[in-house]
Image: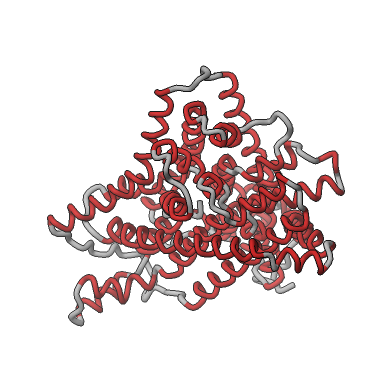
Amino acid sequence: MTKRSGIRPPRPLIAAAVVSALLAFIPLAYLIVRVVSAGPDKILASLFRARTLETTVTSVGLMVVVVSGCLIIAIPAAALLTRTNLPGRRWWLTALALPLAIPSYVAAYAWIAQFPAMSGFWAAAFILVAVSYPYVLLPVAAALRAADPAIEEVARSLGKSPFEAFKTTTLPQAIPAAAAGSLLVALYVLSDFGAVSLFRVDAFTRVIFASYRASFDRTSAAVLASILVLLALILVFAERKVRGKSLQYRSASGTQRIAVLTQLTARARLLSWGFVAVVIVIAIIVPVTSLFMRLVEGSRRSLDVAELAQATLSSAGAAAAGAVIAVALALPIGLLTARYRSKWSTGTESVAFAGHALPGVVIGLSLVFLTINTVPVLYQTLFTLAFAYAVLFLPKSIGATRTSVAAVPPILEQTARTLGRNPFTAWSQTTLRLSWPGIAAGGLLVLLTAMKELPATLMLRPTGFDTLATELWSRTEIAAYGAAAPYALALIALAAIPSFVLSMAMSRDETKNQDPTPRLDTVSL
Protein backbone atom coordinates (compact mmCIF):
# COMPACT_ATOMS: atom_id res chain seq x y z
CA MET A 1 0.00 0.00 0.00
CA THR A 2 1.13 3.55 -0.72
CA LYS A 3 2.42 5.23 2.39
CA ARG A 4 1.58 8.72 3.50
CA SER A 5 4.06 10.76 5.51
CA GLY A 6 6.15 7.59 5.85
CA ILE A 7 3.52 5.96 8.07
CA ARG A 8 1.88 2.68 7.20
CA PRO A 9 -1.79 2.27 8.24
CA PRO A 10 -2.29 -0.16 11.12
CA ARG A 11 -3.43 -3.62 10.08
CA PRO A 12 -6.51 -3.58 12.34
CA LEU A 13 -7.65 -0.37 10.61
CA ILE A 14 -7.14 -1.95 7.19
CA ALA A 15 -9.04 -5.08 8.22
CA ALA A 16 -11.93 -3.08 9.71
CA ALA A 17 -12.20 -0.89 6.60
CA VAL A 18 -12.23 -3.90 4.28
CA VAL A 19 -14.89 -5.66 6.37
CA SER A 20 -17.06 -2.52 6.40
CA ALA A 21 -16.76 -2.11 2.63
CA LEU A 22 -17.59 -5.75 1.98
CA LEU A 23 -20.64 -5.59 4.25
CA ALA A 24 -21.88 -2.54 2.36
CA PHE A 25 -21.33 -4.37 -0.94
CA ILE A 26 -23.36 -7.46 0.05
CA PRO A 27 -26.73 -6.34 -1.39
CA LEU A 28 -25.26 -5.38 -4.76
CA ALA A 29 -23.15 -8.55 -4.91
CA TYR A 30 -26.15 -10.74 -4.16
CA LEU A 31 -28.23 -8.92 -6.77
CA ILE A 32 -25.55 -9.68 -9.37
CA VAL A 33 -25.50 -13.33 -8.32
CA ARG A 34 -29.29 -13.49 -8.53
CA VAL A 35 -29.34 -12.06 -12.05
CA VAL A 36 -26.51 -14.26 -13.35
CA SER A 37 -28.07 -17.42 -11.88
CA ALA A 38 -31.30 -16.74 -13.79
CA GLY A 39 -29.61 -17.70 -17.05
CA PRO A 40 -29.22 -15.75 -20.31
CA ASP A 41 -32.63 -16.72 -21.74
CA LYS A 42 -34.61 -15.29 -18.83
CA ILE A 43 -32.36 -12.23 -18.64
CA LEU A 44 -32.80 -11.43 -22.35
CA ALA A 45 -36.54 -12.06 -22.16
CA SER A 46 -36.84 -9.55 -19.30
CA LEU A 47 -34.55 -7.01 -20.94
CA PHE A 48 -36.31 -6.90 -24.28
CA ARG A 49 -39.86 -6.64 -23.03
CA ALA A 50 -41.73 -3.61 -24.32
CA ARG A 51 -42.50 -2.64 -20.73
CA THR A 52 -38.80 -2.57 -19.85
CA LEU A 53 -38.12 -0.01 -22.58
CA GLU A 54 -41.13 2.07 -21.56
CA THR A 55 -40.04 1.99 -17.92
CA THR A 56 -36.51 3.07 -18.83
CA VAL A 57 -37.72 5.98 -20.98
CA THR A 58 -40.14 7.10 -18.27
CA SER A 59 -37.52 6.96 -15.49
CA VAL A 60 -34.81 8.74 -17.50
CA GLY A 61 -37.27 11.37 -18.75
CA LEU A 62 -38.49 12.05 -15.22
CA MET A 63 -34.92 12.36 -13.99
CA VAL A 64 -33.97 14.86 -16.73
CA VAL A 65 -37.05 17.01 -16.14
CA VAL A 66 -36.60 17.11 -12.36
CA VAL A 67 -32.86 17.86 -12.50
CA SER A 68 -33.50 20.66 -14.99
CA GLY A 69 -36.24 22.11 -12.79
CA CYS A 70 -34.01 22.00 -9.70
CA LEU A 71 -31.19 23.82 -11.52
CA ILE A 72 -33.59 26.48 -12.78
CA ILE A 73 -34.78 27.14 -9.22
CA ALA A 74 -31.63 26.55 -7.16
CA ILE A 75 -28.98 28.50 -9.08
CA PRO A 76 -30.87 31.83 -9.22
CA ALA A 77 -32.02 31.40 -5.61
CA ALA A 78 -28.47 30.67 -4.43
CA ALA A 79 -27.14 33.70 -6.30
CA LEU A 80 -29.81 35.98 -4.83
CA LEU A 81 -29.22 34.75 -1.29
CA THR A 82 -25.42 34.85 -1.32
CA ARG A 83 -24.37 37.57 -3.78
CA THR A 84 -27.00 40.29 -3.43
CA ASN A 85 -28.24 42.59 -0.67
CA LEU A 86 -31.70 40.99 -0.59
CA PRO A 87 -33.04 41.61 2.95
CA GLY A 88 -33.53 38.54 5.12
CA ARG A 89 -31.15 36.37 3.07
CA ARG A 90 -30.30 34.01 5.93
CA TRP A 91 -33.92 33.40 6.86
CA TRP A 92 -34.94 32.89 3.24
CA LEU A 93 -32.19 30.31 2.82
CA THR A 94 -33.30 28.47 5.95
CA ALA A 95 -36.89 28.43 4.72
CA LEU A 96 -35.85 27.20 1.27
CA ALA A 97 -33.99 24.28 2.87
CA LEU A 98 -37.05 23.07 4.83
CA PRO A 99 -38.36 20.73 2.07
CA LEU A 100 -35.51 18.40 3.05
CA ALA A 101 -37.70 17.37 5.99
CA ILE A 102 -40.67 16.55 3.73
CA PRO A 103 -40.52 13.11 2.06
CA SER A 104 -41.74 13.01 -1.53
CA TYR A 105 -44.65 10.74 -0.67
CA VAL A 106 -45.82 13.14 2.06
CA ALA A 107 -45.72 16.08 -0.35
CA ALA A 108 -47.50 14.01 -3.01
CA TYR A 109 -50.16 12.93 -0.52
CA ALA A 110 -50.71 16.52 0.62
CA TRP A 111 -51.13 17.84 -2.92
CA ILE A 112 -53.40 14.95 -3.98
CA ALA A 113 -55.56 15.47 -0.89
CA GLN A 114 -55.95 19.13 -1.89
CA PHE A 115 -56.14 18.59 -5.66
CA PRO A 116 -57.43 15.04 -6.33
CA ALA A 117 -57.16 15.44 -10.12
CA MET A 118 -53.34 15.54 -9.96
CA SER A 119 -51.86 12.46 -11.59
CA GLY A 120 -49.30 11.29 -14.11
CA PHE A 121 -45.76 12.15 -15.20
CA TRP A 122 -45.87 15.93 -14.89
CA ALA A 123 -47.52 15.86 -11.49
CA ALA A 124 -44.76 13.57 -10.21
CA ALA A 125 -42.09 15.81 -11.76
CA PHE A 126 -43.67 18.89 -10.14
CA ILE A 127 -43.62 17.34 -6.67
CA LEU A 128 -40.11 15.90 -7.03
CA VAL A 129 -38.74 19.30 -8.03
CA ALA A 130 -40.48 20.89 -5.03
CA VAL A 131 -38.89 18.48 -2.52
CA SER A 132 -35.45 17.98 -4.07
CA TYR A 133 -34.21 21.42 -5.23
CA PRO A 134 -32.44 21.98 -1.84
CA TYR A 135 -29.97 19.25 -2.85
CA VAL A 136 -28.69 21.71 -5.47
CA LEU A 137 -29.39 24.94 -3.59
CA LEU A 138 -27.28 24.20 -0.50
CA PRO A 139 -24.00 23.15 -2.16
CA VAL A 140 -24.27 25.89 -4.82
CA ALA A 141 -24.88 28.51 -2.12
CA ALA A 142 -21.85 27.22 -0.20
CA ALA A 143 -19.72 27.31 -3.36
CA LEU A 144 -20.79 30.86 -4.22
CA ARG A 145 -19.94 32.02 -0.70
CA ALA A 146 -16.48 30.48 -1.02
CA ALA A 147 -15.83 31.71 -4.59
CA ASP A 148 -12.84 34.01 -5.00
CA PRO A 149 -14.23 37.56 -5.51
CA ALA A 150 -10.95 38.81 -7.00
CA ILE A 151 -11.67 37.20 -10.38
CA GLU A 152 -15.07 38.88 -10.62
CA GLU A 153 -13.57 42.20 -9.60
CA VAL A 154 -11.02 41.95 -12.42
CA ALA A 155 -13.83 41.27 -14.90
CA ARG A 156 -15.70 44.33 -13.63
CA SER A 157 -12.58 46.45 -14.03
CA LEU A 158 -12.43 45.37 -17.68
CA GLY A 159 -15.85 46.87 -18.36
CA LYS A 160 -18.21 43.93 -17.87
CA SER A 161 -21.58 44.48 -16.24
CA PRO A 162 -22.23 42.91 -12.81
CA PHE A 163 -24.33 40.14 -14.38
CA GLU A 164 -21.77 39.39 -17.12
CA ALA A 165 -18.90 39.37 -14.60
CA PHE A 166 -20.80 36.99 -12.32
CA LYS A 167 -21.81 34.70 -15.19
CA THR A 168 -18.30 34.39 -16.65
CA THR A 169 -16.20 34.24 -13.47
CA THR A 170 -18.08 33.34 -10.28
CA LEU A 171 -20.77 31.04 -11.66
CA PRO A 172 -18.26 28.60 -13.26
CA GLN A 173 -16.69 28.17 -9.81
CA ALA A 174 -19.99 26.67 -8.65
CA ILE A 175 -20.16 24.07 -11.45
CA PRO A 176 -18.70 21.24 -9.31
CA ALA A 177 -21.22 22.00 -6.56
CA ALA A 178 -24.07 22.13 -9.07
CA ALA A 179 -22.92 18.82 -10.57
CA ALA A 180 -22.77 17.20 -7.13
CA GLY A 181 -26.22 18.51 -6.26
CA SER A 182 -27.61 17.39 -9.61
CA LEU A 183 -26.23 13.92 -8.99
CA LEU A 184 -28.04 13.77 -5.66
CA VAL A 185 -31.28 14.90 -7.29
CA ALA A 186 -30.93 12.38 -10.13
CA LEU A 187 -30.27 9.53 -7.70
CA TYR A 188 -33.17 10.72 -5.54
CA VAL A 189 -35.51 10.64 -8.54
CA LEU A 190 -34.35 7.20 -9.65
CA SER A 191 -34.82 5.87 -6.11
CA ASP A 192 -38.14 7.58 -5.42
CA PHE A 193 -41.01 5.22 -4.81
CA GLY A 194 -43.70 7.17 -3.00
CA ALA A 195 -44.42 10.03 -5.42
CA VAL A 196 -44.31 7.93 -8.59
CA SER A 197 -46.57 5.33 -6.99
CA LEU A 198 -49.16 7.84 -5.78
CA PHE A 199 -49.25 9.52 -9.19
CA ARG A 200 -49.35 6.14 -10.99
CA VAL A 201 -46.12 6.68 -12.96
CA ASP A 202 -44.48 3.44 -14.10
CA ALA A 203 -40.91 4.29 -13.10
CA PHE A 204 -38.43 1.57 -12.16
CA THR A 205 -39.15 1.62 -8.44
CA ARG A 206 -42.91 1.21 -8.85
CA VAL A 207 -42.58 -1.55 -11.45
CA ILE A 208 -39.99 -3.45 -9.37
CA PHE A 209 -42.07 -3.24 -6.21
CA ALA A 210 -45.23 -4.28 -8.07
CA SER A 211 -43.40 -7.26 -9.57
CA TYR A 212 -42.12 -8.29 -6.14
CA ARG A 213 -45.45 -7.75 -4.38
CA ALA A 214 -47.87 -9.21 -6.94
CA SER A 215 -46.20 -12.28 -8.42
CA PHE A 216 -42.82 -12.32 -6.70
CA ASP A 217 -41.20 -12.54 -10.15
CA ARG A 218 -37.63 -12.76 -8.92
CA THR A 219 -35.97 -12.71 -12.35
CA SER A 220 -37.90 -9.75 -13.76
CA ALA A 221 -37.55 -7.73 -10.56
CA ALA A 222 -33.82 -8.48 -10.31
CA VAL A 223 -33.15 -7.58 -13.97
CA LEU A 224 -35.05 -4.30 -13.65
CA ALA A 225 -33.16 -3.56 -10.43
CA SER A 226 -29.87 -4.20 -12.25
CA ILE A 227 -30.79 -1.71 -14.97
CA LEU A 228 -31.66 0.84 -12.30
CA VAL A 229 -28.29 0.29 -10.59
CA LEU A 230 -26.49 0.64 -13.95
CA LEU A 231 -28.19 3.99 -14.59
CA ALA A 232 -27.19 5.18 -11.13
CA LEU A 233 -23.56 4.13 -11.64
CA ILE A 234 -23.46 5.98 -14.98
CA LEU A 235 -24.65 9.10 -13.19
CA VAL A 236 -21.97 8.80 -10.50
CA PHE A 237 -19.27 8.36 -13.17
CA ALA A 238 -20.54 11.34 -15.20
CA GLU A 239 -20.61 13.58 -12.12
CA ARG A 240 -17.01 12.69 -11.30
CA LYS A 241 -15.96 13.58 -14.84
CA VAL A 242 -17.71 16.95 -14.67
CA ARG A 243 -16.23 17.64 -11.26
CA GLY A 244 -12.74 16.70 -12.43
CA LYS A 245 -12.89 18.99 -15.46
CA SER A 246 -14.28 21.90 -13.49
CA LEU A 247 -11.86 22.22 -10.58
CA GLN A 248 -11.53 25.84 -9.47
CA TYR A 249 -8.89 27.33 -7.19
CA ARG A 250 -8.58 30.54 -5.28
CA SER A 251 -6.18 33.07 -6.77
CA ALA A 252 -4.47 33.63 -3.43
CA SER A 253 -4.13 32.00 -0.04
CA GLY A 254 -5.02 33.50 3.27
CA THR A 255 -8.22 34.64 4.87
CA GLN A 256 -11.21 34.63 2.60
CA ARG A 257 -12.49 38.07 1.55
CA ILE A 258 -16.22 38.64 1.48
CA ALA A 259 -17.47 39.58 -1.97
CA VAL A 260 -19.14 42.95 -2.46
CA LEU A 261 -22.88 42.31 -2.66
CA THR A 262 -24.80 43.41 -5.71
CA GLN A 263 -27.21 46.22 -4.84
CA LEU A 264 -30.74 45.39 -6.01
CA THR A 265 -33.13 48.06 -7.20
CA ALA A 266 -36.54 48.30 -5.57
CA ARG A 267 -38.16 46.50 -8.52
CA ALA A 268 -35.52 43.75 -8.57
CA ARG A 269 -35.95 43.31 -4.82
CA LEU A 270 -39.71 42.82 -5.18
CA LEU A 271 -39.25 40.36 -8.05
CA SER A 272 -36.65 38.43 -6.01
CA TRP A 273 -38.94 38.27 -2.99
CA GLY A 274 -41.75 37.10 -5.24
CA PHE A 275 -39.61 34.35 -6.78
CA VAL A 276 -38.46 33.03 -3.39
CA ALA A 277 -41.95 33.31 -1.91
CA VAL A 278 -43.54 31.33 -4.76
CA VAL A 279 -41.05 28.50 -4.26
CA ILE A 280 -41.72 28.44 -0.51
CA VAL A 281 -45.50 28.44 -1.03
CA ILE A 282 -45.31 25.51 -3.47
CA ALA A 283 -42.77 23.46 -1.51
CA ILE A 284 -43.86 24.15 2.07
CA ILE A 285 -46.98 26.25 2.60
CA VAL A 286 -49.37 24.29 0.39
CA PRO A 287 -48.35 20.81 1.67
CA VAL A 288 -48.36 21.82 5.34
CA THR A 289 -51.65 23.70 4.99
CA SER A 290 -53.20 20.71 3.23
CA LEU A 291 -52.06 18.41 6.02
CA PHE A 292 -53.59 20.63 8.72
CA MET A 293 -56.82 20.89 6.74
CA ARG A 294 -57.03 17.11 6.52
CA LEU A 295 -56.29 16.91 10.24
CA VAL A 296 -59.07 19.35 11.08
CA GLU A 297 -61.55 17.57 8.83
CA GLY A 298 -60.82 14.37 10.73
CA SER A 299 -61.64 10.87 9.57
CA ARG A 300 -64.25 8.20 10.01
CA ARG A 301 -62.45 6.76 13.01
CA SER A 302 -60.87 8.66 15.87
CA LEU A 303 -57.13 8.95 16.13
CA ASP A 304 -55.45 6.20 18.10
CA VAL A 305 -52.87 8.20 20.06
CA ALA A 306 -51.13 5.07 21.33
CA GLU A 307 -50.79 3.78 17.76
CA LEU A 308 -49.34 7.11 16.61
CA ALA A 309 -46.89 7.17 19.52
CA GLN A 310 -45.82 3.59 18.82
CA ALA A 311 -45.23 4.36 15.14
CA THR A 312 -43.20 7.44 16.10
CA LEU A 313 -41.02 5.43 18.49
CA SER A 314 -40.61 2.68 15.89
CA SER A 315 -39.51 5.19 13.24
CA ALA A 316 -37.01 6.84 15.57
CA GLY A 317 -35.73 3.53 16.96
CA ALA A 318 -35.17 1.80 13.61
CA ALA A 319 -33.56 4.92 12.12
CA ALA A 320 -31.31 5.34 15.17
CA ALA A 321 -30.20 1.70 14.93
CA GLY A 322 -29.39 2.24 11.26
CA ALA A 323 -27.44 5.40 12.09
CA VAL A 324 -25.37 3.58 14.74
CA ILE A 325 -24.51 0.78 12.31
CA ALA A 326 -23.67 3.32 9.60
CA VAL A 327 -21.32 5.27 11.88
CA ALA A 328 -19.63 2.03 13.00
CA LEU A 329 -19.08 0.98 9.38
CA ALA A 330 -18.02 4.46 8.26
CA LEU A 331 -15.47 5.12 11.00
CA PRO A 332 -12.64 2.82 9.79
CA ILE A 333 -13.21 3.76 6.14
CA GLY A 334 -13.24 7.47 6.92
CA LEU A 335 -10.06 7.16 9.02
CA LEU A 336 -8.27 5.18 6.33
CA THR A 337 -9.11 7.57 3.49
CA ALA A 338 -8.44 10.72 5.53
CA ARG A 339 -5.09 9.64 6.97
CA TYR A 340 -3.68 7.21 4.38
CA ARG A 341 -4.91 8.32 0.95
CA SER A 342 -3.93 5.90 -1.82
CA LYS A 343 -5.48 4.08 -4.75
CA TRP A 344 -6.14 1.12 -2.48
CA SER A 345 -7.94 3.16 0.18
CA THR A 346 -9.88 5.04 -2.50
CA GLY A 347 -10.98 1.72 -3.95
CA THR A 348 -12.14 0.55 -0.54
CA GLU A 349 -14.15 3.73 -0.15
CA SER A 350 -15.65 3.32 -3.64
CA VAL A 351 -16.85 -0.20 -2.78
CA ALA A 352 -18.48 1.14 0.38
CA PHE A 353 -20.19 3.83 -1.70
CA ALA A 354 -22.19 1.14 -3.50
CA GLY A 355 -25.22 2.17 -1.45
CA HIS A 356 -24.97 5.65 -2.98
CA ALA A 357 -26.16 4.16 -6.27
CA LEU A 358 -28.68 1.67 -4.86
CA PRO A 359 -32.30 2.81 -4.44
CA GLY A 360 -34.17 1.59 -1.39
CA VAL A 361 -36.30 -0.79 -3.45
CA VAL A 362 -33.13 -2.48 -4.78
CA ILE A 363 -31.59 -2.83 -1.32
CA GLY A 364 -34.87 -4.18 0.00
CA LEU A 365 -35.21 -6.68 -2.86
CA SER A 366 -31.61 -7.88 -2.48
CA LEU A 367 -31.89 -8.38 1.27
CA VAL A 368 -35.23 -10.17 0.87
CA PHE A 369 -33.62 -12.62 -1.56
CA LEU A 370 -30.49 -12.95 0.60
CA THR A 371 -32.19 -13.58 3.92
CA ILE A 372 -34.77 -16.00 2.54
CA ASN A 373 -32.21 -18.11 0.69
CA THR A 374 -29.21 -18.00 3.05
CA VAL A 375 -30.18 -16.85 6.57
CA PRO A 376 -33.97 -17.18 6.95
CA VAL A 377 -33.72 -16.36 10.65
CA LEU A 378 -32.89 -12.75 9.67
CA TYR A 379 -35.81 -12.34 7.27
CA GLN A 380 -38.04 -9.42 8.29
CA THR A 381 -36.12 -8.59 11.46
CA LEU A 382 -35.29 -5.22 12.93
CA PHE A 383 -31.57 -5.90 12.43
CA THR A 384 -32.02 -6.47 8.69
CA LEU A 385 -34.05 -3.27 8.40
CA ALA A 386 -31.43 -1.26 10.31
CA PHE A 387 -28.66 -2.82 8.19
CA ALA A 388 -30.54 -1.78 5.04
CA TYR A 389 -30.68 1.81 6.33
CA ALA A 390 -26.96 1.72 7.08
CA VAL A 391 -26.03 0.46 3.60
CA LEU A 392 -28.36 2.90 1.87
CA PHE A 393 -27.04 5.98 3.63
CA LEU A 394 -23.49 4.91 4.51
CA PRO A 395 -21.90 7.41 2.06
CA LYS A 396 -23.32 10.30 4.07
CA SER A 397 -21.59 9.05 7.20
CA ILE A 398 -18.34 8.24 5.38
CA GLY A 399 -18.15 11.71 3.85
CA ALA A 400 -18.74 13.45 7.17
CA THR A 401 -16.22 11.20 8.95
CA ARG A 402 -13.54 11.66 6.31
CA THR A 403 -13.95 15.45 6.25
CA SER A 404 -13.86 15.75 10.04
CA VAL A 405 -10.85 13.48 10.51
CA ALA A 406 -8.91 15.20 7.70
CA ALA A 407 -9.38 18.56 9.47
CA VAL A 408 -7.52 17.30 12.59
CA PRO A 409 -3.71 17.77 12.30
CA PRO A 410 -1.97 14.34 12.53
CA ILE A 411 0.76 15.95 14.65
CA LEU A 412 -1.60 15.94 17.65
CA GLU A 413 -1.92 12.19 17.59
CA GLN A 414 1.81 11.78 16.98
CA THR A 415 2.58 14.02 19.96
CA ALA A 416 0.33 11.93 22.17
CA ARG A 417 2.26 8.84 21.08
CA THR A 418 5.57 10.44 22.06
CA LEU A 419 4.09 11.10 25.52
CA GLY A 420 3.61 7.38 26.10
CA ARG A 421 0.03 6.85 24.92
CA ASN A 422 -0.69 3.63 23.08
CA PRO A 423 -2.05 4.03 19.50
CA PHE A 424 -5.71 3.64 20.43
CA THR A 425 -5.52 5.98 23.43
CA ALA A 426 -3.63 8.59 21.42
CA TRP A 427 -6.23 8.42 18.65
CA SER A 428 -9.24 8.54 20.97
CA GLN A 429 -7.88 11.46 23.04
CA THR A 430 -6.98 13.62 20.03
CA THR A 431 -8.43 12.75 16.62
CA LEU A 432 -11.66 11.16 17.85
CA ARG A 433 -12.37 13.89 20.39
CA LEU A 434 -11.87 16.71 17.87
CA SER A 435 -13.62 15.04 14.94
CA TRP A 436 -16.55 13.65 16.91
CA PRO A 437 -18.95 16.56 16.15
CA GLY A 438 -18.53 15.93 12.41
CA ILE A 439 -18.90 12.18 12.85
CA ALA A 440 -22.07 12.75 14.86
CA ALA A 441 -23.37 15.05 12.12
CA GLY A 442 -22.93 12.20 9.67
CA GLY A 443 -24.95 9.98 11.97
CA LEU A 444 -27.69 12.64 12.11
CA LEU A 445 -27.78 12.71 8.29
CA VAL A 446 -28.35 8.95 8.28
CA LEU A 447 -31.00 9.27 11.01
CA LEU A 448 -32.83 11.97 9.05
CA THR A 449 -32.94 10.09 5.75
CA ALA A 450 -33.65 6.68 7.32
CA MET A 451 -36.80 7.98 9.05
CA LYS A 452 -38.20 8.91 5.61
CA GLU A 453 -37.24 5.70 3.77
CA LEU A 454 -40.32 3.90 2.47
CA PRO A 455 -39.76 0.97 0.01
CA ALA A 456 -37.01 -0.76 1.99
CA THR A 457 -39.12 -0.39 5.13
CA LEU A 458 -42.18 -1.90 3.43
CA MET A 459 -40.12 -4.89 2.25
CA LEU A 460 -38.00 -5.59 5.31
CA ARG A 461 -39.92 -4.50 8.41
CA PRO A 462 -40.85 -7.22 10.90
CA THR A 463 -44.45 -8.37 10.91
CA GLY A 464 -46.51 -5.95 12.99
CA PHE A 465 -43.70 -3.37 13.08
CA ASP A 466 -45.23 -0.13 11.78
CA THR A 467 -43.40 3.15 11.31
CA LEU A 468 -44.80 6.58 10.52
CA ALA A 469 -43.91 6.03 6.86
CA THR A 470 -45.68 2.68 6.58
CA GLU A 471 -48.73 3.85 8.53
CA LEU A 472 -49.01 6.90 6.30
CA TRP A 473 -48.59 4.77 3.19
CA SER A 474 -51.21 2.21 4.19
CA ARG A 475 -53.79 4.97 4.74
CA THR A 476 -52.88 6.93 1.63
CA GLU A 477 -53.23 3.84 -0.58
CA ILE A 478 -56.92 3.60 0.33
CA ALA A 479 -57.42 7.39 0.05
CA ALA A 480 -58.00 7.76 3.83
CA TYR A 481 -56.44 11.23 3.76
CA GLY A 482 -57.87 12.39 7.07
CA ALA A 483 -56.56 9.33 8.89
CA ALA A 484 -53.13 9.74 7.25
CA ALA A 485 -52.68 13.42 8.18
CA PRO A 486 -51.51 12.89 11.81
CA TYR A 487 -48.83 10.45 10.66
CA ALA A 488 -47.65 12.80 7.92
CA LEU A 489 -47.37 15.73 10.33
CA ALA A 490 -45.65 13.57 12.93
CA LEU A 491 -43.13 12.39 10.33
CA ILE A 492 -42.36 15.96 9.26
CA ALA A 493 -41.98 17.05 12.89
CA LEU A 494 -39.73 14.11 13.68
CA ALA A 495 -37.56 14.68 10.61
CA ALA A 496 -37.35 18.40 11.36
CA ILE A 497 -35.45 17.75 14.62
CA PRO A 498 -32.19 16.47 13.05
CA SER A 499 -32.67 18.96 10.17
CA PHE A 500 -32.75 21.83 12.67
CA VAL A 501 -29.71 20.52 14.56
CA LEU A 502 -27.73 20.18 11.33
CA SER A 503 -28.72 23.63 10.05
CA MET A 504 -27.69 25.20 13.36
CA ALA A 505 -24.35 23.39 13.22
CA MET A 506 -23.77 24.62 9.67
CA SER A 507 -24.67 28.18 10.70
CA ARG A 508 -22.13 28.07 13.53
CA ASP A 509 -19.44 26.79 11.16
CA GLU A 510 -20.25 29.58 8.72
CA THR A 511 -20.05 32.19 11.47
CA LYS A 512 -16.68 30.93 12.63
CA ASN A 513 -15.49 30.93 8.99
CA GLN A 514 -12.60 28.63 9.80
CA ASP A 515 -12.67 26.89 6.41
CA PRO A 516 -14.05 28.66 3.33
CA THR A 517 -14.15 25.48 1.28
CA PRO A 518 -17.70 24.16 0.76
CA ARG A 519 -18.00 20.70 2.29
CA LEU A 520 -20.40 19.00 -0.04
CA ASP A 521 -20.26 15.75 1.92
CA THR A 522 -21.82 17.41 4.95
CA VAL A 523 -24.62 19.15 3.09
CA SER A 524 -25.68 16.19 0.95
CA LEU A 525 -28.90 15.68 2.81
| Residue most extreme to the left | 266
Residue 363: image location, x then y, percent: 69, 51
Q: Is residue 38 left or right of residue 412?
A: right
Residue 26: image location, x then y, percent: 76, 56
Residue sitting at x 38%, y 68%: 254
Q: Is residue 297 above or below residue 77?
A: above
Q: In this view, does 459 lie above or below 234?
A: above
Q: In which quarter of the image is the N terminus?
A: bottom right
The answer to whether one can see residue 430 in this image is yes
Q: In this view, does 383 lie above or below 148?
A: above
User: Which residue is at the front of the view, 15 or 104?
Assistant: 104
Residue 237: image location, x then y, percent: 59, 71
Quadrant in which residue 154 is drawn: bottom left
| Residue most extreme to the bottom | 158
Residue sitting at x 47%, y 27%: 482
User: Which residue is at the front of the view, 238 or 109?
Assistant: 109
Q: In this view, does 257 lie to the left or right of 196?
A: left
Residue sitting at x 71%, y 74%: 2
Q: Is residue 262 above or below residue 173?
A: above
Residue sitting at x 67%, y 53%: 208
Residue 358: image location, x then y, percent: 65, 57
Q: Is residue 161 left or right of residue 116?
A: left
User: Which residue is at the front of the view, 247 or 372?
Assistant: 372
The answer to whether one can see residue 426 in this image is no
User: Which residue is at the front of the view, 212 or 401?
Assistant: 212
Number of numbered labels in the structure image: 0
Q: Say how the picture is coloured.
A: secondary structure
